[in-house]
Image: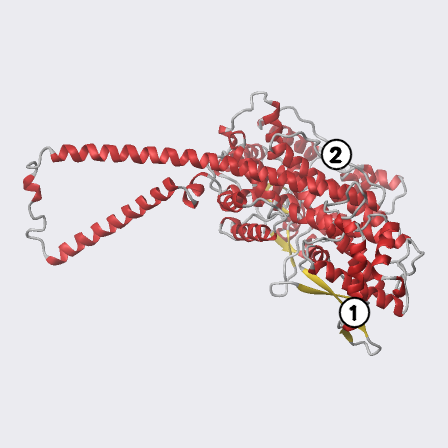
């Protein structure tokens, strides 16, 4: 159903509205704002109808509308869709009274609205295509609307509007093609096809949700896992993955298939971000026709999206065996160049995805035929054996005649009913099994789901019937299918909080062995084990860690006490000594600590982790406890199978003395010590 898009001083046009208009699925309507602020749409009268008739006559005189080629052709013409979009943006700009003022602007804008609506109403018949350059575009528009309404001049704003219209349409197309409902499901078909060389591990939650938690990558990996769930073509783990044996073509395909989330996610985010920027840009216009806007904002966003489109297109081409530079990269310096590059790359992306979908569906059809043939052969063999058993039984018609006696003789009616009920249930189950086998043998969804993943089996019927990715019906069906898949039980599987992890039995066994070694060393040096609460009063912890105090986890007030999770085991031990009035003590403590830090799992930095502390408190000989702590650390590291190691000695008093000599105020000691502690973790530019 055709919908209406209002334009005027208070209106904005979205990318989706511009696309629907260029596709003939919407019409324009002028909205004027009266002096009292009320908005009203302009109704066409007899005068407007006569004006439209004049425009049609002028149109017939133009040979421009006869070129049926898409995009900017060799003759320098806009596509039919870009022509409509350019006229719509020009009408929007004029209606806002910025480049042409007064009643003339309103009348000219209204006439352009009528022209756009007339083009849309003609459907695919004789679509109008205007020149891509501003001078030719202005001349053609003036010849269509007539000089009496005012003249559209060849000024900077006009070339900018034409380029923005072209760029906006291509970005909207790229956004649709790169969405998780299109590019990821089609890529999953290639993973099915290359399944013997791949496993599901490259797309696991550990790789993306934990180790590389970029939002776009996580989303892409999630869609791939959902599409491939239950597939028999793709290996579950890396154990049975087949080697490509030096086949460069296969190795390249596998490489691009394994890393799909790493370029699908960022490319999608770049395109979506550029769409938001371009939507804002196309609703902006100069205050006068002579002022030229700087195009840096649009170029930065557009070039980022262009890189994403090229990455997606080349990835799709390589996954089906093509070269990895089928669509060359470029760095446009003007909006017109950007528009041309996007038209080339977006068209290439659509063709690449359609080819990948076709090849994937052909592979699935072949595998489905093989499976059906195998199942039919098995059923034929079973029928043959059953027939042979029946023939053998018929050769002895008098055999086991005693068994044919009434089996219910002497059985009560209640027992007989129970026996018959159980038999009926067994027969129903057997019939259901036979029906399922027959369905697999006959093909269809049952056979698909027994071979391929839940998602690929669902999208195969859609893409095998139509793989035209400009078909809105197909795109809607794909969206419905993938959204339904992602809302299923598998996607509702709970996740561990970021920066934490579960320990499997094998990991627990290794950790337990390590803790036993550490405990033995501590106890050999006369240490006793203590434990403290996992949370402390907030006032106990704050102010003890300098800048790192912001990493303490605060807990909600639970009855008058402000609490926080312990950041380390040292401050709780100091509180332990103060509360329990302990004298000399050698203590060790193994427990979990919590830090509200940005986790980096690849570097082993978690938000929840264990610390193993050994402390000597009390009065002892000078430097004796220090040397013993070093000895304990060396013995533990020698006992653990970690190889060679080195120990860095930190002495707070020595560091404080150095800071004091350098003239650092005493209240800055802790802050600077915290910064020094980061020198081996972060670059000097950040620490400074």
Q: Nearer the viewer, residue 564 or 685?
A: 685
In the displayed structure image, the side of residue 425 where residue 267 appears, left or right: right
Q: Pinpoint residue 198: horizontal percent, then vertical percent.
A: 54, 32
Depicted 24 relative to depicted 43: above or below: above
Residue farthest to the bottom, as pictured: 36
SS at circle 1: helix
Label 1 neighbour load within 10 Å: few <14, some 14-19, many 20+ = some
Tell which of 590 and 114 is nearer to you: 114
Q: Position of residue 228 (x, y in %)?
A: 51, 41
Left or right: 199, with 442 as reference point: right
Is residue 56 shown above or below 471? below
* 487 sits to left or right of 107: left
**Mark 2, secondary structure of its residue:** loop
Horizontal and vertical percent position of residue 59: 79, 56
Residue assigned mark 1: 48
Can residue 490 be spotted in the picture?
yes
Give the labeled residue for mark 2.
328
1 or 2: tag closer to the N-terminus: 1
Comparing 122 with 648, the one in front is: 122
Q: Which of the image's four quarters has the N terminus?
A: bottom right
Kindly identify the residue that appears in the image at 90 percent across and 43 percent down: 663
């Amino acid at each position: 159903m055709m919908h209406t898009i209002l334009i005027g001083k208070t209106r904005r046009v979205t990318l989706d509205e511009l696309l629907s208009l260029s596709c003939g699925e919407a019409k324009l309507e002028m909205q004027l704002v009266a002096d009292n602020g009320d908005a009203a749409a302009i109704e066409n009268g007899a005068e407007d109808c006569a004006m439209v008739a004049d425009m049609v006559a002028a149109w017939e005189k133009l040979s421009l509308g006869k070129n049926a080629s898409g995009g900017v052709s060799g003759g320098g013409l806009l596509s039919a869709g870009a022509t409509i979009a350019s006229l719509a943006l020009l009408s929007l700009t004029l209606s806002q009274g910025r480049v042409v003022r007064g009643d003339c602007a309103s009348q000219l804008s209204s006439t352009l609205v009528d022209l756009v609506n007339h083009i849309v109403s003609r459907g695919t018949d004789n679509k109008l295509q205007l020149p891509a350059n501003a001078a030719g575009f202005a001349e053609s528009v003036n010849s269509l609307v007539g000089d009496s309404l005012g003249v559209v001049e060849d000024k900077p704003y006009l070339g900018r509007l034409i380029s923005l219209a072209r760029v906006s349409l291509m970005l909207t197309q790229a956004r649709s093609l790169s969405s998780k409902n299109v590019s990821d499901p089609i890529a999953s078909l290639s993973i099915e096809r290359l399944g013997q060389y791949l496993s599901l591990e490259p797309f696991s939650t550990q790789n993306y949700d934990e180790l590389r938690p970029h939002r776009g990558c996580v989303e892409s990996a999630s869609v791939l896992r959902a599409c491939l769930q239950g597939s028999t073509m793709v290996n579950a783990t890396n154990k049975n993955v087949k080697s490509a044996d030096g086949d460069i073509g296969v190795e390249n395909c596998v490489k691009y298939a394994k890393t799909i989330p790493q370029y699908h996610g960022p490319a999608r985010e770049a395109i979506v971000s550029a769409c938001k920027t371009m939507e804002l840009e196309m609703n902006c216009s100069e205050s006068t026709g002579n002022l030229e806007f700087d195009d840096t904002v649009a170029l930065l966003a557009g070039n980022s999206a262009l890189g994403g489109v090229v990455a997606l297109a080349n990835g799709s081409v390589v996954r089906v065996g093509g070269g990895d530079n089928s669509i060359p990269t470029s760095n446009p310096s003007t909006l017109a160049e950007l528009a041309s590059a996007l038209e080339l790359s977006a068209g290439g992306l659509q063709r690449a995805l359609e080819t990948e979908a076709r090849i994937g569906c052909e592979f699935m059809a072949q595998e489905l035929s093989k499976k059906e043939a195998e199942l039919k052969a098995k059923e034929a063999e079973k029928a043959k054996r059953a027939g042979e058993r029946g023939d053998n039984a018929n050769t002895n018609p008098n055999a086991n005649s005693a068994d044919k006696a009434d089996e219910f003789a002497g059985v009560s009616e209640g027992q007989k009913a129970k026996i018959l009920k159980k038999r009926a249930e067994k027969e129903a189950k057997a019939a259901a099994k036979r029906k399922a086998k027959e369905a697999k043998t006959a093909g269809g969804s049952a056979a698909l789901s027994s071979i391929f993943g839940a998602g690929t089996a669902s999208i195969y019927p859609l893409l095998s019937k139509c793989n035209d990715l400009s078909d809105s019906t197909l795109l809607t069906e794909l969206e419905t299918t993938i959204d339904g898949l992602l809302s299923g039980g598998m996607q509702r599987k709970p996740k561990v909080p970021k920066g934490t992890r579960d320990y499997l039995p094998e990991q627990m066994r290794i950790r337990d062995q390590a803790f036993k070694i550490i405990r033995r060393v501590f106890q050999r040096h006369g240490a006793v084990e203590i434990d403290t609460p996992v949370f402390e009063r907030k006032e106990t912890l704050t102010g003890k860690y300098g800048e790192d105090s912001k990493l303490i986890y605060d807990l909600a007030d639970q009855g008058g006490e402000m609490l926080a999770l312990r950041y380390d085991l040292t401050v709780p031990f100091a509180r332990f000594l103060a509360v329990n009035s302990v004298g000399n003590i050698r203590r060790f403590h193994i427990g979990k600590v919590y830090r509200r830090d940005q986790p980096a799992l690849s570097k082993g930095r978690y938000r929840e982790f264990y610390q193993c502390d050994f402390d000597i408190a009390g009065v002892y000989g000078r430097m004796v406890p220090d040397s013993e702590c070093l000895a304990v650390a060396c013995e533990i590291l020698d006992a653990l199978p970690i190889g060679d190691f080195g120990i860095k000695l930190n002495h707070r008093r020595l560091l404080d003395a150095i800071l004091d000599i350098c003239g650092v105020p005493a209240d800055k000691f802790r802050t600077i010590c915290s910064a020094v502690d980061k020198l081996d973790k972060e670059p000097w530019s950040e620490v400074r």
